[in-house]
Image: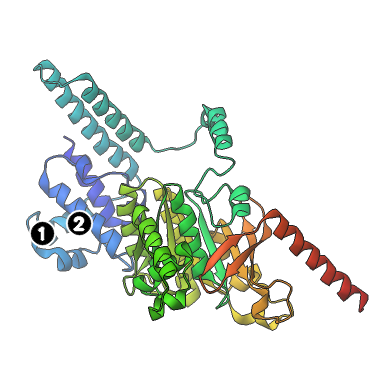
Amino acid sequence: MNLEAERAVLGSLLKDHELMDGCYLTAEDFSDFEENRTLFKVLQYAKEHFEGEKEPFDPVLLVTKWGERLQRVGGLNRIMSLRSSIPSTSSFNHYQESVRASRIQRELQEMGQQIAAGGGGDLSELRLKMNQLAELQRGQEGSGPVHMASLLDGHGLTIMKRAQCSGVTGAKTANDDISQMSGGHQPGDLEIIAARPSMGKTQYVLNDMNAVTKDGWAAVIFSLEMSALKMVERLVSIIGGVKNKRIKSGLMSDNDWDSYSKAVEIIASRNLYIDDTPGSTVEYVRQQVKQLKKKHSKLVVYVDYLQFLNTERKFTKNNERIGHITKVLKGIAREMAVSVVAISAVGRDCEKRPDKRPLMSDLRESGDIESDADVVTFLYRDEYYNADTIKKKIVELIVAKGRDIGTGTFEMVFENETGRFINMTKEQKEKLAEKVREREREAHSKR
C-alpha cells in the first residue's frame, strides 16, 4: 500500500476542491486503511451536493455536515493536518497515479496468490479480472493526445454498420427527415426544442419519446411544469389517437376505450420513465440519469422545460443560471453518453416582427443555450398567427443550428385534439410546396 500517496491526494483535494473534477480515483483505489477511504467518500459527496458553496471542502463545513463520521477518522485536526501537509498541488496527478498503481499491484498480487494456491478459478474469471485491471490502467493514464490513425482502427466496419441502419445511427426522432439528416439523437449531444407558447413543444417531445422507444431505446422526461399523470394522459392520446378532452372528461366511446387499452399496453411494454419531482435541480437530474444509465445503455433524456430547472449553485442573474444549467446538461450528455433534449421558451420579441418565426437571436437572452447546444430546433405554427394561412394543421420544424448536420425546415401535420405529430407523405409535401409557390406568385403579382 502507498499511504503517503493517499494522504497526498486527500491533502491536495482539501486544498483545492476543483481538482476533484479531474480525479479519476474511486474509494476502492484506497487501501484498507479505512480513514482514507471514508474521507475520500465524504469529499466525493461534498463536491456533488455542495458545489454551490464557495469552498465545499472547507474543514469547518465538512465537520459541521459529517461531524460524527469524520470524528471516527480523526476529525478536524486530521483534516487540517492533511491540508497543511501539501505545500503545492502541482503534483496531484502524480499522486493519484501512484494510488491507482498501488491498487493494481495489490490486485495482481492477490491473483498470483490465488493461482499459486490452486484457487485461481476458471480461465474466464481470470480473463475478466485482467480486463478489469486493464480498464483501471487506462483510467489512470487518461486519454491524452492520441494519433488520429488509431481512431480509425475498424472504422470501416463502423461505417458499414451505419449503412445497415439506413443512416439512422442513434435514436430515431419524431420527424423522419430530421432523423435522416442527423442520424437520429446522438449520445453526447445536447438538443434544444424551442418555441413560443401554444406551438406544441411538449406534445412534440412526447411524440419524440414514442418514436425513440419503438426501437428499444429508453427515454426519461423530467417534467417541471406538468404533473406526471397529465403528461402520461397526453402520451396515451398520442399513441392511441384518443382525443385528449375525452380522456379528461371520461366521456369515451367503446372505440376510444379500445384505443386507450392498446396505448396503455404499448406504454407498459416500453422503457418510458417520467420524473415530476417539484423544484428539481440539474444536479438531481444528473443523479437520476446516472442511475438509469446503469439499467439502459441506450438512453435519451428530456427536460420540460429548461427555464424551470433549478441548480444548487447561487446566481444573481438569470441568464448566468441558465448558462450554468445548459453547460451541466451538456456535461451529462458527454460524460454518460446519452442524448439530452431540453425544451426552451422563446422571448416574445419574435412576435413583434412581420415574420414571427423564431431566430437564433431570440435565444441570446437565455444564457449560453446557443453556444452549448449541438442542435437547436424551433417549432412554428403559422395558423396560430395567420387565419388565412395555407399551412392549416402544419407545424414547421426549423433546425436553426445543427452542428455536423446542417440546417433546414421540415413540416409535419399536427393533430391538436390528440397531440399527434404526423410525418407528411411525399404527395402531401409536393401539394403543400405547390400551394406555397402559388401564394408567392399571387403576392408578387399584387406588388
The reply to whether dot 2 and dot 1 touch (C-beta < 8 Å) is: yes
The residue depicted at 37 percent of the width and 45 percent of the height is 297
Q: Which mark is residue 435?
A: none
Instruction: Give the amino acid at mark 2.
Output: Val
Q: Of 204 and 393, which appears nearest the observer?
A: 393
Instruction: Report crowding for label 1: few under 14, some 14 to 19, many 20 or more residues within 10 A (C-alpha).
Output: some
Check the image and report above or below for 68 versus 88.
Answer: below
**Location of residue 289 (image quadrant):** bottom left
Q: CA distance from mark 2 to mark 1?
A: 9 Å
Residue that appears at 21% across and 28% down: 105
Query: 378 or 32: nearer the eye?
Result: 378
Quadrant where the N terminus is found in the figure: top left
Across and down, in percent, residue 373 comes to 54, 59
In the rendered structure, find residue 69 and report the number of the disc placed on it: 1
N-terminal label among 2 and 1 = 2
| Quarter residue 77 falls in | bottom left
Pick whichever, 130 or 166, lies toward us. 166
Residue indicated by mark 2: 42
Q: Amino acid at mark 1?
A: Arg
